[in-house]
Image: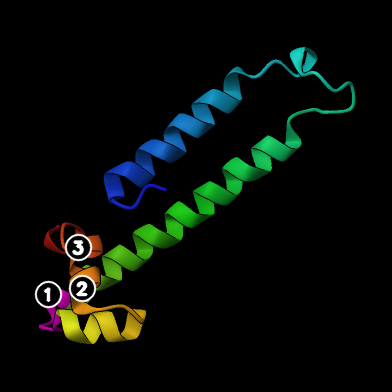
Amino acid sequence: MPRTRAQLEKAVADTESWLDTLDPEALTSPDSDGADLRAIAEALHAVAAVDLALADQIATARANGRTWTQIGTILGVSKQAARERFGESAHH
């Protein structure tokens, strides 16, 4: 699953583009209109939005002088795991 801001934004854009190309008439099930796939894409979009908001808040915390130990504690991970996942976004 994508984790960086760029990966999340690309995953959302790619999924939405792919869904726009679906032909409902070409789906194998006559009662399937692709709504289930669109719901997955919408859920991915929601996850991406939350992940981006979290990354922004972590960047703000870092700008305010918070340590990776403090951030990791809140996230329930080690400081190393927090830095590895969010270190890049904390610089933006």
Q: At label 1, which amino acid type do we have?
A: Ala
Q: Is residue 64 magenta?
A: yes
Structural crowding at the residue carrying mark 3, measured as other residues with C-alpha within 10 Å and reported as few (<14), some (14–19) or many (≥20): few
**Helix, strand, or loop for circle 1?**
helix
Query: For the point 59% across and 46% down, which residue is it?
Result: 42
Number of numbered discs:
3
Query: For the point 16% across and 79% down, which residue is it?
Result: 68
Colour convention of the picture? rainbow
**Disc 1 to disc 3, how far (Cα)?**
17 Å
- Residue 27 found in image quarter: top right
Q: At label 3, which amino acid type do we have?
A: Glu
Q: Earlier in the sequence, mark 2 or mark 3?
A: 2
Q: Please state, as top left, top right, bottom left or bottom right, where the C terminus lies in the image.
A: bottom left
List the residue tagged with mark 2. 60
Q: 56 or 79: nearer the eye?
A: 79
- Mark 1 vs mark 3, foreground winner is 3
Q: Determine which of the numbered discs, if any, sits on residue 63 in the image.
A: 1
Q: 85 or 90: nearer the eye?
A: 85
Residue 84 spot, x, y in % from top left: 19, 63
List the residue tagged with mark 3. 84
Residue 69 spot, x, y in % from top left: 18, 84
Structural crowding at the residue carrying mark 2, measured as other residues with C-alpha within 10 Å and reported as few (<14), some (14–19) or many (≥20): some
Q: Main secondary structure of the magenta part?
A: loop
- Image height of 25 relative to 57, above or below: above
Labels 2 and 1 touching (C-beta < 8 A): yes
**Disc 2 to disc 3, how far (Cα)?**
17 Å
